[in-house]
Image (cartoon, rainbow, N blue to C red):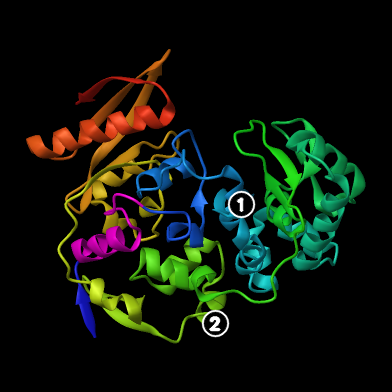
Amino acid sequence: MLTASARDVLAARITAQQLDRESGTLADTAVLDLGVQDTGPDGALWALAVRGVDVAAFDPGELATVWTLRGAPHLYRRADLPAVATATAPFSEADAAKRVFDAARPLKAAGIPVLTALDTLAATMRGIVTAPMVKGEMSRRLSQAVEEPYNRYCRPCDAVHSHEQTFRLAALRAGLELRPGTSPPVLQPVPGFAPAGTVPDRLDVVRAYLHLLGPATHQHVAGYLDAPVKDVKAHWPEDAVEVTVDGQRRWLLAEDADRLGAAPAPVTRLLGPFDLFLQGRDRETIADPARRTELWPVLGRPGAVLADGAVAGVWRPRKAGSSLTVAVEPWQTLSPAVRGAVEEQAGRLAAFRGIRLKAVDFA
């Protein structure tokens, strides 16, 4: 059995997620296989930029944003959408019930399987959205078109509308994507959309997690997908090999085993708050217990400073007019070389946002 330390795991993930490269294309960017969460101003496109993709050089139409895993907006290659719809769909009725949270109970009481409910909502949504439509208007029309088990009273909105999670998980089934840069979100039809009958290995969500965030346990993968552990085990890859990480039994794809034990890449990156590197469900591997509330607070997540193979601190952007200040809180003394690299990355972030870098403040 292979053995590895937490540092070995993070070093392997840096390589698997291509955080150590200076240039790349959409076609060869591995994180797009699992989807790149697009949350906040430094979301999906910044995640691509720190992996060497020139986000100003490709045709924006090559990518599409859809609600998938955990109901979060994710960026994918447009050509992959048919297979993504199949890959990210619930594995079973029990899985669907878990993913829709509180919507499962009224549907069960009405005798409606959750998978049937998702298909019903998808068909209704498809009929409503024939051209770009703001989410609020689409939600209003949907709540009028379906019966009570599909709707709920929302106290913050003081209105009756569909359960949020069923709404989001049905959208891609309906062939709907999110128009980039819209707030509130605008949904629009995906031209010529139809779910694929098969899923290539690289888009299989369990395999992709093990490749990009392994070594991992069944529970880690289930937590990321919001799926039952039983379903994850049923879809476990046959070529996964066991790895002991600081005494815990985990698994990794056999093809990735040779990455373990390699020295961490000497790179410095400013990762966005929802970057995939920070999305692993083994938070104990990513940060010490004393630092986890700083990295993953309930509200207002900061970004993470990646340096010398580990998270070395957090950062927050402060925009004022056309200038940007990046406030950095190191968790350790940073060498002059790393400080210089952080400043270089902050300049890169400002250029990405199209504004001037005013300062980098080290707490």
Q: Is residue 19 above or below residue 347?
A: below
The residue tagged 1 is 71
Determine the residue positioned at 67% across, 36% down.
Answer: 185
Q: Is residue 43 left or right of residue 261?
A: right
Which mark, residue 79? none
Residue 63 appears in view:
no
Residue 177: x %, y % from top left = 69, 48
- Residue 123 visible here: yes
Q: Is residue 9 magenta?
A: yes
Does residue 51 appear left or right of residue 177 in this picture?
A: left
| Pointer 2 residue | 234
Q: CA distance from mark 1 to mark 2?
A: 22 Å
Residue 42 x %, y %: 44, 36
Viewport quadrant of the N terminus: bottom left
In which quadrant will I find the C terminus?
top left
Give, as a three-letter code, the residue at label 1: Gly
Q: Earlier in the sequence, mark 1 or mark 2?
A: 1
- Of all residues, the one furthest to the top in this rendering is 321
Q: How many marks?
A: 2
The magenta segment is: 6-23
Vertical position of residue 146 compared to residue 344: above or below:
below
Dominant secondary-structure state across the stretch colored magenta: helix
Which residue is drawn at the image coordinates 29% and 29% (left, top)? 347
Location of residue 207 with respect to 254 vertically, above or below: above
The image quadrant of residue 88 is bottom right
Residue at image x 44%, y 69%? 219
Q: Secondary structure at mark 2?
A: helix
Find residue 271 and report its image quarter. top left
Figure check: 29 above or below 235: above
Q: Nearer the viewer, residue 346 or 120?
A: 346
